[in-house]
Amino acid sequence: MPDHDVLIVGAGPVGLLLACLLVQDGMRVEVCERRTHADDRTRAIGIHRPGLEALDTAGIGTAVRAEALRLEGGEVRSRRRSLAS
Ligand SMILES: Cc1cc2nc3c(=O)[nH]c(=O)nc-3n(C[C@H](O)[C@H](O)[C@H](O)COP(=O)(O)OP(=O)(O)OC[C@H]3O[C@@H](n4cnc5c(N)ncnc54)[C@H](O)[C@@H]3O)c2cc1C
């Protein structure tokens, strides 16, 4: 008999957020990750509003904002042309 209700394969942002939300709902969750150490490349250039709202739902949005630099805008450029802002 497993000691969890849900098994999540992959401890990326999606798996970890899902685990947080399920635990808040009273589920027993196990997360399996094949990597044995953290990736040393950053993937934290920016978190958009829907992502922040999801982190708020998980109860960690305030802690994330406290460590973050708030940006009011941004621009995507290619070959000296602005593609989006
Ligand atoms: C260089 C780079 C920069 C980025 N910058 C940003 C950014 O600034 N802002 C942003 O919002 N997004 C950014 N992204 C995108 C963001 O990283 C992805 O959208 C996000 O990681 C996807 O999350 P995920 O949980 O779906 O997948 P992943 O992050 O890929 O996580 C999946 C996990 O599952 C594990 N796994 C897979 N198969 C198995 C298995 N069979 N058994 C056990 N474990 C398994 C993998 O090892 C991995 O850890 C960036 C991506 C890259 C590559």
Image (cartoon, rainbow, N blue to C red):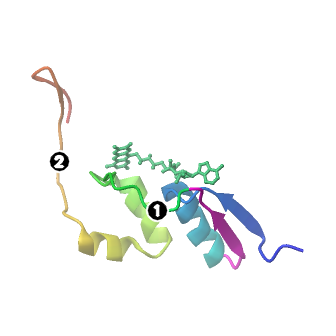
Q: Secondary structure at mark 1?
A: loop
Mark 1 surroundings within 10 Å by alpha-carbon count, few (fewer than 14), some (14 through 19), many (20 or more): few
Q: Which quadrant would the N terminus be assigned to in this image?
A: bottom right
Give the magenta range: 25-34
Q: Is residue 45 above or below residue 62?
A: above
Camera-side residue of 6 and 39: 39
Residue at which label 2 appears = 73
- Residue 57 position within the rendered picture, expressed as x and y whole percent measured from the top left: 49, 69
Q: Amino acid at mark 1?
A: His
Front label number (2 vs 1): 1
Task: Give the farthest residue toward the left.
Answer: 80
Q: Which SS does the magenta portion mostly show?
A: loop
- Residue 13 position within the rendered picture, expressed as x and y whole percent measured from the top left: 48, 57
Task: Give the farthest residue toward the front.
Answer: 36
Q: Is residue 27 above or below residue 72?
A: below
Answer with mark 2 or mark 1, whichever residue precedes in sequence: 1
User: Which residue is found at the position 74% from the left and 66% from the top?
Assistant: 6
- The answer to whether mark 1 is within 8 Å of ligand 1 is no
Residue at which label 1 appears = 37
Mark 2 surroundings within 10 Å by alpha-carbon count, few (fewer than 14), some (14 through 19), many (20 or more): few
User: Which residue is found at the position 80% from the left and 77% from the top?
Assistant: 3
